[in-house]
Every structure is written in structure tokens, then in C-alpha cells.
Amino acid sequence: FPSGNKAPGAEANCCNDPEAAQMVFAAKGANITMAGLNVTHQLEMSEVRDAVKSVSDAGEFLYRVSQGYMDCLRSWGDNGPGAIGCHDPCAVMVLLDSSLFQARRGCVVVEVKGEYTRGATIADFTGRLGEAQTDVLLKVDAPRFYKELA
């Protein structure tokens, strides 16, 4: 999986509060789907913005207000100097059409003590870290994803 976006080994939400993230992943009976950086970086936010811009007034609004989000992610070096990963739209689209994604069930834990890895998520598909409680998105059908937005 790629490195983090807010920290070298952690995605922003888990980096900001790894204890809370670990509590979510450890919640018994929760139905969790994880749209990690490994899948969100398979898409480009600029293409999503372009896809929704001319659809409606709401699309135009989303296009305009998302510029600040893009600037913030770019300041963190998200996905390198060019493309910005498509984070939040993935989380929404998997709820609307899960067939756009390939997933694998696994046990996800969050590192809360590491000096360099605090906030990193570890997906274990072997059962060594515990019972599988999360559907981890692995791949997205990018052409279909962009088409669904238009």
C-alpha cells in the first residue's frame, strides 16, 4: 500500500486520532468498509471534479468548494506533486455501488504507539491479528467510477 498522506505512514483521519480509529475498527458487530489510500489513489480528484462540474448547480458548487480541499492535500504532498487521490468520494461511492470495487475481508488494526508509524493501519488477511471485521477495498474500476458520477 502507498505511504500516508498526512504522515509518512498514516492517512489523515487515523493520524489525527489513532486511538479513536482503533476503537472503530475494534467495535464488535460493526459493519466496516475501509477505503484506504491504496484504493483512493487509483483515482484522481481532478477527474471527479471535472465529472461533476457541469452536471448541475450542486456539481458546480462541489467543484468550486473542493479547491480548498485540493490545496490542503497538495500541501501535504498527497500522491506526489501532480494528482490528488479521491478519498471521500470513494467512501460515498462504495455505499452507492459496491460493484465498482474489489474488496477482501480482513482484520484491520491501527498502530497507536509507534514513534514513526502512529496512525498506520495494518490489514491482516491471515487471521494472526484477530477476527476479520473489515471489508478492505483493494481495487476500483476507475472508468466505471467516473462514468457513474456523470
Image: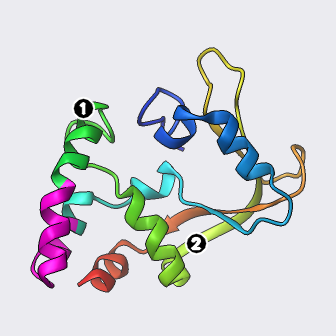
Horizontal arrangement in the rendering, residue 4 relative to residue 102 (left or right): left
- Sequence-first disc among 2 and 1: 1
Q: Is residue 96 magenta?
A: no
Q: Position of residue 53 (x, y in %)?
A: 12, 74
Q: Main secondary structure of the magenta part?
A: helix
Q: Residues within 10 Å of mark 2 (few under 14, many from 20)?
A: some
| Quarter location, residue 60 | bottom left
x 85%, y 52%: residue: 126
Q: Is residue 83 visible?
A: no
95 to 15, vertically: above or below = below
Q: Position of residue 145 (x, y in %)?
A: 36, 77
Query: If the image is split into quadrants, where does the C terminus sit?
Result: bottom left
Q: Is residue 50 visible?
A: yes
SS of the residue at dot 1? helix
x 43%, y 57%: residue: 40
Cα distance, mark 2 to mark 1? Answer: 30 Å
Q: Residues within 10 Å of mark 1 (few under 14, many from 20)?
A: few
Please report contact status of discs 2 and 1: CB closer than 8 Å, yes or no.
no
Residue lying furthest top: 115
SS of the residue at dot 2? strand
Q: Amino acid at mark 2?
A: Gln
Q: Amino acid at mark 1?
A: Ser
Q: Which residue is mark 2?
A: 102
21 to 117, vertically: above or below = below
Q: Which residue is mark 1?
A: 75
- Residues rendered magenta in the picture: 49-66
